[in-house]
């Protein structure tokens, strides 16, 4: 703290009073309270648009504290619609928190949302692997992308450090450069593999070569067209990882080289008691090639009486986007795992989220930011947020009420004003009412247990599954209504009229 204050003294105007720096040295979060929706919850920050809440330090909510020297509270609010994070506290403290909180919230929420979109398109059974480390916005951005894409629904990451720090499952495949570094089987050292059940070691290159002749004959592929360096790379990898053998098929030619070489090595390993775990494609028409590969695997499995061969997982990569997943679904494919990098971690469809941090009450007096654009207008006052559910268990509306208002009751009719249609009153009857905010930080310390990363991920998927199909679909979704109570609407109207 002393060093921080000294630095600020060096960069602020020389006329800054010493008392200000003395005050800075005393600042802490002892009077701060933080409330938020639970991590992994779906939050509608703009009418009709879905996003996830911030995921900083595995959960936090409102931040509250006194304005120095004043009798009253300051409350700030995130997002132009449903505030998924509320902060109360001394004015200077919460103002200093603004940039930090927005930095922590924006990218995390954006990546989790982007990952959720990929998961919705891929369906629940497709394996999704985050592989964006090379394209991410620096090391910190890469770690954040791995963490929050996992929360959004991805199954694993290629980022080993993220696996170490956060416990995310780590997966990877062979690199093209590894395959290209071999030219012939003579380069393979060591050469022997011990059978899974024990016994004398076997020369795997020789065994693979014998299987290659049989595979080429079955597939009617000229053996001289098969790349020997690629075969050597596969054999070398198989000797090192006999229980984890996988093949990258497109370094040279999938049909004439990659696939025959893989099948030969996989069948050689099978003879020794091992099973290959998969293949990967990184170029070309991925959906069509996956179907061709599956046909070959089925042919080999049937001909050589190896039943599991036809179920070998097929993974794909190569600049995968949402459009790619839609094409896979439309055309049909035999893909089992998809690696997504650039279009996941850089979020090209919306490179920044744009969450905002706005003052809504000072010393007990609600305040309002006026704008010509109603959607960007702040909603005044300290608020409680409720999610209203229908009889089918789907949320159908989020309702903002002033903190002092009584909670709505399930089964009772409510008069509300929907944002975007504030000129008319709507009547709704919720089957279930859920308060969204919990207080996670109070009096300078965490006040509620924070969930694990896996618990947050599970909650995120459960939150998505509760949405009605009309709200969950990615193309032309039905707008999700966010409303205010009649009392909050009256306060909004009064403040607008007074300001004008």
Image: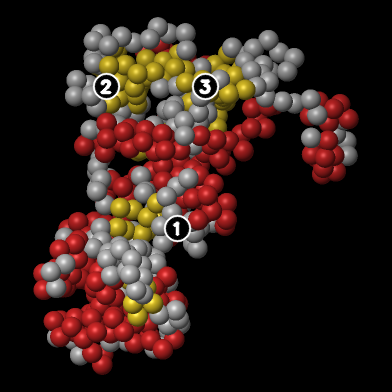
* Residue found farthest to the front: 199
**Frontmost residue, 76 versus 152:** 152
- Give the x, y percent position of residue 86: 52, 25
Picture residue at 46% right of the left edge, 38% below the top: 453
For discs 2 and 1, the disc positioned in front in the rendered view: 1
**For numbered disc 3, what is the local secondary structure?**
loop
- Give the x, y percent position of residue 169: 42, 50
Is residue 301 toward the left or the right of residue 238 in the image? left
Q: Is residue 188 above or below residue 354?
A: below
**For numbered disc 2, what is the local secondary structure?**
strand
Q: Residues within 10 Å of mark 1 (few under 14, many from 20)?
A: many
Disc on res. 158: 1
Picture residue at 42% right of the left edge, 82% below the top: 188
- Nearer-N-terminus badge (1/3): 1
Q: Which residue is mark 3?
A: 448
- Give the x, y percent position of residue 302: 11, 69
- The quadrant holding residue 372 is top left
Residue 297 seen from this side: yes
In contact (CB < 8 Å): disc 3 and disc 2: no
In contact (CB < 8 Å): disc 1 and disc 3: no
- Give the x, y percent position of residue 403: 47, 12
- Nearer-N-terminus badge (2/1): 1
Q: Residues within 10 Å of mark 2 (few under 14, many from 20)?
A: many
Query: How far is the residue under mark 2 from the one under mark 1?
Result: 39 Å
């Amino acid at each position: 703290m002393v060093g921080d204050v000294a630095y600020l003294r060096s960069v602020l105007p020389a006329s800054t009073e010493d008392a200000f720096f003395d005050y800075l040295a005393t600042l802490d979060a002892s009077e701060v309270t933080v409330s938020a929706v639970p991590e992994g919850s779906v939050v509608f920050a703009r009418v009709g648009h879905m996003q996830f809440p911030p995921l900083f330090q595995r959960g936090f909510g409102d931040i509250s504290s006194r304005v120095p020297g004043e009798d009253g509270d300051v409350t700030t609010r995130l997002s132009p619609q449903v505030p998924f994070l509320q902060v109360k506290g001394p004015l200077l403290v919460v103002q200093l928190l603004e940039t930090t909180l927005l930095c922590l919230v924006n990218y995390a929420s954006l990546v989790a949302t982007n990952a959720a979109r990929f998961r919705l398109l891929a369906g629940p059974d497709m394996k999704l692997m985050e592989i964006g480390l090379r394209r991410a916005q620096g090391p910190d951005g890469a770690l954040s992308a791995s963490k929050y894409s996992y929360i959004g629904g991805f199954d694993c990451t290629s980022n080993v450090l993220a696996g170490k720090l956060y416990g995310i499952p780590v997966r990877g495949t062979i690199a093209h450069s590894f395959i290209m570094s071999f030219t012939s089987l003579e380069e393979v050292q060591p050469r022997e593999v011990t059978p899974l059940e024990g016994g004398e070691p076997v020369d795997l290159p020789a065994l693979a070569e014998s299987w290659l002749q049989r595979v080429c004959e079955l597939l009617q592929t000229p053996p001289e067209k098969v790349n020997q360096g690629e075969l050597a790379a596969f054999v070398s990898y198989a000797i090192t990882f006999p229980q984890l053998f996988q093949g990258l098929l497109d370094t040279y030619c999938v049909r004439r080289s990659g696939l025959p070489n893989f099948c030969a090595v996989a069948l050689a390993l099978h003879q020794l008691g091992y099973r290959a775990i998969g293949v990967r494609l990184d170029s070309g028409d991925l959906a069509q090639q996956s179907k061709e590969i599956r046909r070959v695997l089925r042919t080999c499995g049937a001909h050589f009486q190896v039943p599991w061969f036809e179920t070998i997982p097929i993974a794909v990569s190569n600049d995968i986007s949402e459009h790619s997943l839609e094409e896979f679904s439309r055309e049909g494919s035999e893909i089992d795992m998809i690696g997504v990098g650039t279009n996941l971690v850089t979020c090209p469809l919306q490179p920044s989220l744009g969450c905002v941090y706005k003052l809504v009450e000072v010393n007990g007096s609600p305040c309002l930011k006026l704008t010509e654009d109603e959607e960007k207008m702040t909603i005044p006052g300290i608020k409680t947020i409720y999610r209203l559910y229908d009889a089918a268990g789907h949320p159908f509306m989020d309702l903002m009420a002033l903190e002092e208002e009584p909670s709505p009751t399930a089964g009772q009719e409510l008069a509300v004003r929907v944002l975007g249609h504030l000129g008319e009153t709507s009547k709704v009857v919720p089957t279930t009412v859920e308060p969204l905010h919990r207080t996670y930080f109070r009096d300078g310390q965490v006040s509620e247990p924070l969930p694990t990363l896996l618990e947050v991920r599970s909650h995120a998927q459960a939150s998505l599954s509760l949405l009605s199909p009309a709200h969950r679909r990615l193309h032309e979704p039905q707008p999700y209504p966010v409303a205010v109570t009649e009392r909050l609407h009256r306060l909004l109207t009064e403040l607008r009229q007074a300001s004008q």
